[in-house]
Amino acid sequence: MTASTKIYDFDEIINRRNNNSDKWCAYSKEILPMWIADMDFKAADEIVDGLTAMAQTGVYGYGKARPDRLLEAIVYRLQRLYNWTIAKESIVMLPSLVSGFNIAANLALRDNPNAEYLFHTPAYPPFFAIEKNVGSKGIAVPLIEKVEGNTLRYEIDFDKMEASITDNTKIFMLCNPQNPSGRVFTKAELLALEAFAEKHNLIVLSDEIHAELLWEGEHIPYATLSEQAKAQTITLISASKTFNLPGLSGGFAIIENPELREAYEKAMMGFIPRMNVFAMKGTELAFDYGDEWLSQLKTYLIANRDYLVAELSKIEGLKFTVPEATFLMWLDFSETAIKGKAYQALLDHGLALNDGNTFGADGNYARINFGTSRVHIEKAVEIIRETLA
């Protein structure tokens, strides 16, 4: 960091109730919201300045569907971060990664009207919604929960995966880093998943949206494991979580197999809109100029995580993950006074978390978002203590 480098103030409290924030407007003003996965921090100056200049032109016409400068920024970043060399042609622009899940399921249904998809639980809620949205049956396979003291760790149950798959299973939907557990799967785990996918001839949709918010271990893009993995994989990536741009709504798929890419693009034709011009510009600016902000953010988030671990460790009966990535922590209240009703009990005391039921778990669990200023983290810990007293 040079003497002229800006120091970002992540302790600054931003009033988000006056800008239609879902996170801050879903509950009354008396409730501290630490649920939906966006952060309470201002974006990097270069992103703010670039989007402001773009807005101030006063012209909001159609943008190119595939801007060369953005494609170049994506190619360069993947090469620099993971030594992953892709062609610009392999990039498919998306209005959101959630739409990317549903497109993949639609692709499978075009070949097999009984197509199923398999995924791990606890899971990001939109994985469950695919079944209702598209009509493809979801097969939920629980991760193995391991407890050591008051910490939780989740591992893949390969035996359960084998027992659950059917002849109609066409897609395995991987989330790595995993939401809500914060696991970063090891190379050995990923290679075992690759062997499973190859054995059953599965397309792998790999949601890697949290990959750059990594605290421990190494993120390995699934598609880089082998030529076979490359041919099977739809990788979903976005700047939205890393650079706090989810409201711009945009992302992209990397599909290096031309036939799979063509089928994916056909499955989205006519009902999936273009990535909007502000999302495109925001992604380009983030990838080109956001690294210093990101470096400072990661230091702040790791400190938030470690503070939560230290304070929650003092609460008898409470168990939690120590996330290896993401700004999300998974809490287990099954051995506390609010077992079975964690979300509602905490809400009644002024803290809004994500209800574990929506992740395919039960009322013992909740997810907390620590992508916020420290004063909010401290208040949340205070409310948890009061609720359990």
Image (cartoon, grey):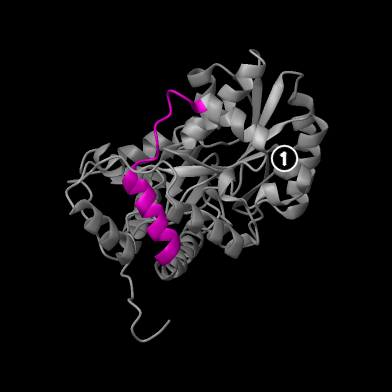
Does residue 286 sit above or below 338 in this rendering? below
In the displayed structure image, the side of residue 375 where residue 333 appears, left or right: right
Front residue of this view, candidates 136 and 383: 136
User: Mark 1 is on which residue type?
Assistant: Ala
Q: Position of residue 387 (x, y in %)?
A: 37, 45
Q: Quadrant of the N terminus?
A: bottom left
In the displayed structure image, the side of residue 317 where residue 52 appears, left or right: left
Q: Looking at the rendering, which quadrant does residue 90 occupy?
A: top right
Q: Position of residue 260 (x, y in %)?
A: 65, 33
Name the outermost residue toward the top. 113
Magenta includes 289? yes
Residue visible at 70% across and 51% down? Answer: 224
Pointer 1: what residue? Answer: 231
SS class, disc 1: helix
Residue visible at 72% across and 18% down? Answer: 168
Front residue of this view, candidates 308 and 134: 134
In the displayed structure image, the side of residue 227 where residue 271 appears, left or right: left
In magenta, the rendered stretch is 268-290
